Image: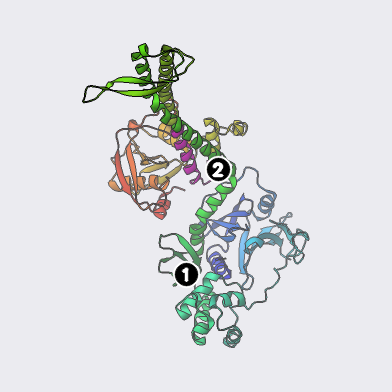
């Protein structure tokens, strides 16, 4: 994993520089495996995130907003009891392991000063968070480990905390040149350098191992025998000398399309597209922010995604049948024509005939003769009754054509609505956003089984996102159709400007004038960029955005929430910058 012991050392250095002496103001547990400590430091308010989940374990400051449950878990209640008002005394990394100990000065039940420890183990699926007293007695553990889970190491309240079992690897911070050379000689000449480093040395991720190989040999897939011993030793020593001295350079590497692919505590020279970040905590927010949100949505919205998929499949199948039936309605004119031919040739027909070749007086040829048409007849009916039967089929197909066209239009509108909900799921940030989508689906009739849950919820104003342009104008952005409808029809004034990605599902974005002068072109561009980012075109290099004044918007009777009609508008093509838009966000 990229969050290796070296990156943990970088985080520990940041905590010592910023948070020593800071006091805990509040304790939250927004997720089952995540604890957030609201701290008051000398640099201002900071939120320390401790994530002991199996997917993205980490520790560091965060600026990402998280919504807390109404009823805190027991682990959170106990931390609030002991750590509210506690002062951070020290931050200690256990050797070169992915174990960090935070020592706190607090008060016990009698009011006497005492010490408590918060220990986080960042070890993939074995990650955990323990709260102990000064002697190491475990007072609480986020994920208890008993004999049924592990026979090697148990972590339970009342037991004394012990470090995880040691690995048979060498500490890279304490290895000497002679030891390194001896270990190098034991490696096979054909063994890849990165594989040898991760298998031999403690706490080194594959990313850092490949970087050492690249610095020593100029290639990430170089083998031990391809590089000079001294060059490999020098590259290895330089990396871990920087760790010992606290010289860190948090770096994110990207692929050709600009998507982050790797991160580390040192500059990744193996990648041409890379950038350094001010602090390891800022890097973690950039790297895990989107991933955490997508994971939460996938976990919490599984039933919504299943409902949308089923509804989408059902409507597509229905539309396919309706379009097939509509194509058959094109035969209606042929029914009318054959009925007219029977009536025109009625004198030549008799009951009992199964078919007849009838003269088509509309098909006049060059020699003055007329063409003929073979018409199937029902032998049980008279000629006039056969004509009447065809006229009825013509009338039925004409009526069906009108109704099918209406139903197909409704089905296509329904598909567009479902796509807008699907797009809204991609912008979910908090459980409240997800609850609003459930409420919206319940109102629209797609999730009737959710109505009982929605009925017990107190109605509240939707929690839209707010931004501030470089010109100081407020910009509101809806993250689902309820929020879109609220900001467009309840908050925005008629003279305010409304933005939406052209021809695709997306957020409503409103630029509020609030009595100010007409905004500059830059303000319009920034508002249009927000609309482009929060749409189905997310990630596209260029997106066309329609914008108009709110007075030009009309809501069709019976339309789904968030759907509007407009005929007068301008258009702009923008290339949204996610980081610049994030900087505009009002916290």
- Please give the residue where the numbered disc 2 appears in the rendered image: 305
Quadrant of the rendered structure where residue 47 is? bottom right
Quadrant of the rendered structure where residue 570 is? top left
In this view, 341 is above or below 42:
above
Tell me the distance, in whole angstroms, between the alpha carbons under discs 1 and 2.
40 Å
Instruction: Check whether the beta carbons of the residues at disc 1 and disc 2 lie within 8 A of each other.
Output: no
Describe the element under mark 2 as helix, strand or loop. Answer: helix
> In the figure, is residue 219 to the left or right of 156?
left
Residue 521 picture location, percent across and down = 28, 46
In this view, 56 is above or below 501:
below
Q: Which residues are magenta?
A: 409-433
- Whether residue 410 is in magenta: the answer is yes
Classify mark 1: residues with Cα within 10 Å, few (<14), some (14-19) or many (20+).
many
Q: Which of these two is toward me, 115 or 306?
A: 306
- Residue 249: mark: 1
In this view, 562 is above or below 532:
above
Q: Which of these two is toward me, 114 or 446?
A: 446
Residue 432 in sight in this render: no
Residue 138 picture location, percent across and down = 73, 61
> In the figure, is residue 153 to the left or right of 580?
right
Q: Which of these two is toward me, 468 or 204?
A: 204
Name the residue at 47% across, 14% down: 381
**Tag 2 or tag 1, which sits nearer the N-term?**
1
């Amino acid at each position: 994993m990229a969050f290796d012991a070296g990156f943990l050392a970088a985080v520990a250095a940041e905590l010592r520089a910023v948070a020593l002496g800071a006091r805990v103001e509040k304790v939250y547990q927004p997720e089952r495996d995540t604890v957030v400590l609201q701290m008051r430091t000398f640099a201002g308010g900071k939120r320390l995130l401790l994530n002991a989940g199996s997917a993205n374990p980490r520790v560091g400051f965060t600026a990402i907003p998280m919504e807390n449950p109404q009823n805190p878990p027991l682990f959170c209640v106990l931390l609030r009891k002991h750590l509210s008002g506690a002062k951070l005394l020290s931050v200690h990394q256990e050797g070169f392991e992915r174990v960090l100990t935070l020592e706190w000065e607090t008060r016990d039940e009698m009011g006497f000063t005492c010490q408590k420890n918060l220990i986080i183990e960042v070890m993939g699926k074995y990650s955990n968070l323990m709260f102990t007293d000064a002697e190491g007695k475990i007072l609480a553990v986020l994920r208890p480990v008993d004999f049924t889970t592990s026979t090697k190491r148990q972590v339970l309240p009342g037991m004394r905390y012990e470090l995880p079992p040691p690995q048979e690897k060498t500490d890279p911070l304490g290895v000497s040149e002679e030891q390194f050379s001896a270990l190098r000689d034991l490696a096979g000449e054909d063994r890849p350098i990165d594989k040898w480093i991760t298998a031999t040395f403690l706490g080194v991720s594959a990313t850092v191992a490949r970087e050492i190989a690249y610095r020593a040999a100029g290639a990430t897939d170089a083998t031990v025998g391809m590089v000079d011993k001294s060059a490999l030793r020098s590259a290895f020593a330089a990396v871990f000398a920087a760790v010992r001295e606290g010289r860190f350079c948090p770096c994110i590497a990207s692929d050709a399309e600009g998507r982050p692919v790797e991160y580390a505590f040192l500059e990744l020279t193996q990648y041409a597209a890379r950038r350094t970040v001010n602090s390891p905590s800022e890097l973690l927010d950039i790297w895990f922010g989107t991933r955490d949100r997508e994971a939460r949505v996938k976990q919490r919205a599984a039933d919504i995604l299943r409902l949308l998929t089923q509804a989408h499949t059902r409507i597509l199948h229905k539309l396919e049948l309706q379009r097939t039936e509509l194509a058959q309605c094109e035969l209606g004119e042929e029914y009318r024509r054959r009925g007219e031919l029977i009536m025109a040739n009625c004198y030549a027909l008799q009951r009992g005939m199964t078919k007849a070749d009838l003269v088509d007086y509309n098909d006049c040829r060059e020699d003055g003769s007329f063409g003929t048409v073979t018409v199937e007849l029902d032998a049980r009916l008279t000629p006039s009754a056969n004509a009447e039967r065809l006229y009825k089929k013509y009338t039925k197909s004409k009526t069906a054509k009108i109704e099918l066209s209406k139903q197909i239009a409704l089905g296509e509108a329904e598909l567009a609505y479902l796509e807008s909900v699907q797009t809204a799921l991609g912008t979910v940030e908090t459980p409240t956003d997800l609850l609003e989508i459930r409420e919206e689906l319940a109102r629209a009739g797609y999730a009737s089984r959710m109505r009982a849950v929605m009925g017990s919820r107190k109605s509240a104003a939707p929690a839209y996102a707010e931004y501030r342009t470089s010109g100081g104008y407020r910009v509101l952005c809806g993250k689902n159709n309820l929020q879109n409808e609220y900001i467009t029809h309840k908050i925005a004034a008629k003279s305010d400007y409304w933005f939406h990605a052209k021809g695709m599902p997306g957020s409503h974005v409103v630029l509020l004038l609030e009595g100010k002068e007409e905004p500059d072109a830059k303000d319009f561009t920034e508002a249009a960029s927000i609309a482009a980012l929060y749409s189905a075109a997310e990630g596209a290099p260029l997106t066309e955005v329609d914008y108009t004044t709110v007075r030009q918007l009309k809501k069709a009777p019976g339309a789904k929430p968030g759907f509007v009609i407009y005929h007068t508008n301008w258009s702009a093509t923008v290339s949204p910058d996610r980081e610049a838009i994030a900087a505009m966000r009002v916290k």
